[in-house]
Amino acid sequence: MRIKAATAVEKGVLEIRELELGEPRQGEVLVKLAACGICHTDTSTLNLVVPSPLPMVLGHEGVGIVEKAGPGVQSLQPGDHVILSFPSCGNCPSCRSGKPYACDTSSELFFNGIYQSGGTRIKDDEGRDVGSLFGQGSFADHCIVSERSAVKVDPEVDMKPLCSLACGAQTGAGAVLNLMKPTPGDSVAVFGCGAVGMSAIMAAKLAGCSTIIGVDAVPSRLDMALECGATHVINGKEVPDIAAEILRLTGGRGTNFALESSGAAALVPPMLNGLAKEGLAVIVSFAGDVELNMSMIFVGSCRTLAGTVEGAAEPQTFIPKLVQFYKEGRFPVDKLAAYYPFDQIHQAFADSASGKSIKPILLFE
Ligand SMILES: NC(=O)c1ccc[n+]([C@@H]2O[C@H](COP(=O)([O-])OP(=O)(O)OC[C@H]3O[C@@H](n4cnc5c(N)ncnc54)[C@H](O)[C@@H]3O)[C@@H](O)[C@H]2O)c1
Ligand SMILES: [Zn+2]
Ligand SMILES: [Zn+2]
């Protein structure tokens, strides 16, 4: 079928193109998209921060309705409302032990544009293969995904504000609830108050943390961090010694947990130095290189630094929990949403980069 899809055609160049989408294969579904969020990882892929073969249709936070189920699909049928999350193979030791975020093939399935059963599903008018980011490519009116990635949701819920549950919100909330696992009264510092960081702040509040510190450089984002549950905020561009400020705010102890979701390598040392003894820092961004005095930072303080993909979440069980928290008003991701018609995608990217829109959401109808 013919689709209109925002396609990364070369480094930094995104164009809406008419392309030919094939049929869903074994275990795959065709989804008519209602909306798709823009995550910073779309920008990183477009700019080849993560090396990926182009052309590729970007978009990995789609929500929509199943239009057609391919052969062997068991859990979904046409008409089902779905949030489209990340792909995984289902067969490796991690997948088989319920940890699809640590799938042996996640790098290929996320960034090579291909599907688990092989190949791409899209061709351009010259007959060339076009990839689909995250085995999804949901900056388009229709896409094909594995049923493993598609999480069925209650049709009564308006899914449009929930796009970020597919990736950004799942990652921030999962980093807190699945990895940090704070107990009531604990403290958390969140570096970078984008959709990932804001979701971590909401999750920290949900988990009963007493001190929640948001760090960003955009004043409107710091205001929103306070609205989402931060007890304190730090403007990283104005405060010269962020670690000292975190120590001051925590009575000299530092925070039990910290999250790096800014993508700024310079924030990693203050994040680690602001951690309490036995503190755990989680990094989700592509922050790049930074020099660390490892023995000074880690040994005497017994601290840990962990990386994670998608907040160590198993989407089929974690996303429904987040939807339930949202319905209860305890995970208000709709506060982060800014809506754009699909053809204003470039404006949406620009507003994300400038800090104006926290979670731009493209609408397809
Ligand atoms: N590991 C994963 O599975 C996963 C999943 C989703 C997103 N990510 C990554 O997480 C990061 C966050 O994603 P997002 O969509 O929330 O991005 P975003 O761009 O919306 O948010 C980043 C925030 O960091 C702030 N920031 C950047 N540099 C700063 C500095 N020097 N000082 C203070 N604040 C600074 C920005 O103002 C912005 O608010 C990205 O790197 C993204 O690629 C990783
Ligand atoms: Zn796997
Ligand atoms: Zn993402």
Image (tube, rainbow, N blue to C red):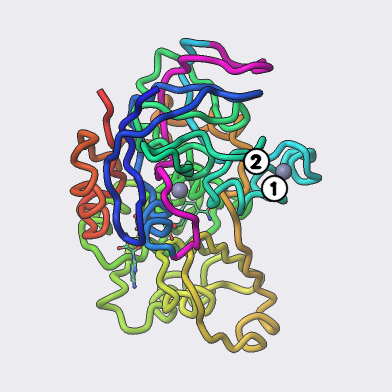
Q: Residue at x 24, y 43 (%)?
A: 345
Q: Which residue is mark 1?
A: 103
What segment is highlighted magenta in the picture? Answer: 49-77
Asked if residue 199 can be seen in this view, the reply is yes
Judge whether residue 59 is colored magenta.
Answer: yes
Examine the rendered structure and indicate whether residue 224 appears above or below residue 122: below
Quadrant position of the N terminus in the picture? top left
Q: Which residue is mark 2?
A: 88
Quarter location, residue 248: bottom left
Image x and y of residue 14, in percent: 29, 51
Secondary structure, mark 1, is: loop
Image x and y of residue 10, in percent: 35, 58
Between discs 2 and 1, the one toward the N terminus: 2
Is the distance from the Cβ of mark 2 to the nearest ligand 2 atom less than 8 Å? Answer: yes
Label 2 sits on what residue type? Ser
Label 1 sits on what residue type? Cys
Q: Residues within 10 Å of mark 1 (few under 14, many from 20)?
A: many
Examine the rendered structure and indicate whether residue 250 appears above or below residue 354: below
Is the distance from the Cβ of mark 1 to the nearest ligand 2 atom less than 8 Å? Answer: yes
Secondary structure, mark 2, is: loop
The overriding secondary structure of the stretch rendered in magenta is loop
In front here: 223 or 345? 345
